[in-house]
Image (tube, rainbow, N blue to C red):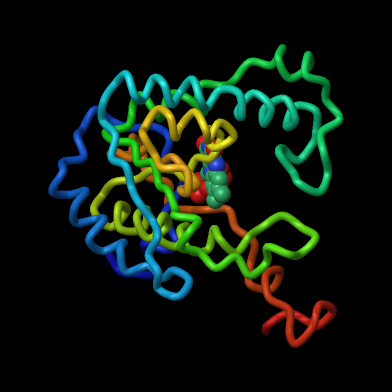
């Protein structure tokens, strides 16, 4: 596919056919995705390739608590898991919320599930002393994740970055034997899309870019 077509049509895929995603295709995807940048080119990422049914079921179990709070907050009109605006919901309200299948089914239905980690002993977290939530460390792993999804699209496959399970990171580490210094960046179900969305809803450049300073006009 042409690069801009890939960039403009790589949607979050959560529904998969029964088609496999063979190891050789996954290898091609990862072999191209690995050219993503990382801070200092230290390349601290690690990818666990999961096909085992019982491991997926365990990942579903670890996805549910985070997804329950996410869903409860959305239903209450809050921005879920927001670090600036804490939730006003009680534990009881969250516990009473049903988790929609879209958070869990992809992990069971996908041809393969990737758990992407990053070695925190390899990242330069330049923002670690700021009075806000850390952001920079993620930039040493998410470009790789996005490259994986772009390459998958190019090969006729798709997937979604999912993060709900990361709320239970210690249990993911224990489940998969991930060393303590690794953070889990995301869990990515991947497979052949049931349907391919090609029109994504995104803000335009005029809403995205400001000229010279915060109150500057849009890029014309
Ligand atoms: C940081 C991040 C976390 C996400 N976490 C989840 C998730 O836990 N579960 C899920 O179904 N989708 C998740 N998504 C997918 C987004 O919902 C999706 O990319 C967005 O809604 C755009 O969808 P579209 O490309 O189909 O328009 C996540 C995406 C990002 C970038």
Residue drawn at x 44%, y 40% is 187
Q: Is residue 131 above or below residue 41?
A: above
Q: Nearer the viewer, residue 196 or 137?
A: 137
Q: Is residue 122 left or right of residue 82?
A: left
View extreme (left): residue: 24
Where residue 182 sits in the image (x, y, percent)? Answer: 46, 48
- Which residue appears at 59% of the width and 20% of the height? 99
Q: Residue at x 58, y 53 (%)?
A: 201
Q: Which sits in the foreground, 143 or 220?
A: 143
Number of marks in picture: 0
Q: Position of residue 104 (x, y in %)?
A: 47, 24
Residue 115, by quadrant, is top left
> Relative to the observer, which residue lies in front, 145 or 119?
119
Image quarter for ligand 1: top right
Residue 110: x and y in percent read 32, 32
The image quadrant where one finds the N terminus is bottom left
- In this image, 188 relative to 157: left or right? right
Residue 71 is left or right of residue 194, and the answer is right
State the quadrant of the C terminus. Answer: bottom right
Q: Is residue 7 above or below residue 87?
A: below
In the picture, measured across the screen, residue 22 lies left or right of residue 169, that is: left
View extreme (bottom): residue:
212
Q: Residue at x 67, y 31 (%)?
A: 70
């Amino acid at each position: 596919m042409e690069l801009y077509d890939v960039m403009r049509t790589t949607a979050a895929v959560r529904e998969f056919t029964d088609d496999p995603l063979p190891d050789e295709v996954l290898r091609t995807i990862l072999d191209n995705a690995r050219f993503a940048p990382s801070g200092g080119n230290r390349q601290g990422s690690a990818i666990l390739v999961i096909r085992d049914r019982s491991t997926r079921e365990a990942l579903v179990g670890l996805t549910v608590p985070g997804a329950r709070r996410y869903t409860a907050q959305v239903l209450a009109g809050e921005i879920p898991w927001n670090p600036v605006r804490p939730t006003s919901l009680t534990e009881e309200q969250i516990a009473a919320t049903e988790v929609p299948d879209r958070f869990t089914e992809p992990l069971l239905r996908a041809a393969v599930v990737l758990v992407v980690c990053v070695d925190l002993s390899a990242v330069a977290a330049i923002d670690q002393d700021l009075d806000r939530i850390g952001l920079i460390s993620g930039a040493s792993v998410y470009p790789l994740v996005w490259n994986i999804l772009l390459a998958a699209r190019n090969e006729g496959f798709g997937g979604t970055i999912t993060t709900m399970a990361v709320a239970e990171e210690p249990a993911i580490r224990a489940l998969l034997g991930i060393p303590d210094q690794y953070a889990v960046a995301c869990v990515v179900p991947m497979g052949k899309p049931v349907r391919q969305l090609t029109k994504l809803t995104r803000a335009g450049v005029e809403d995205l870019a400001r000229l010279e300073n915060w109150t500057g006009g849009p890029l014309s």
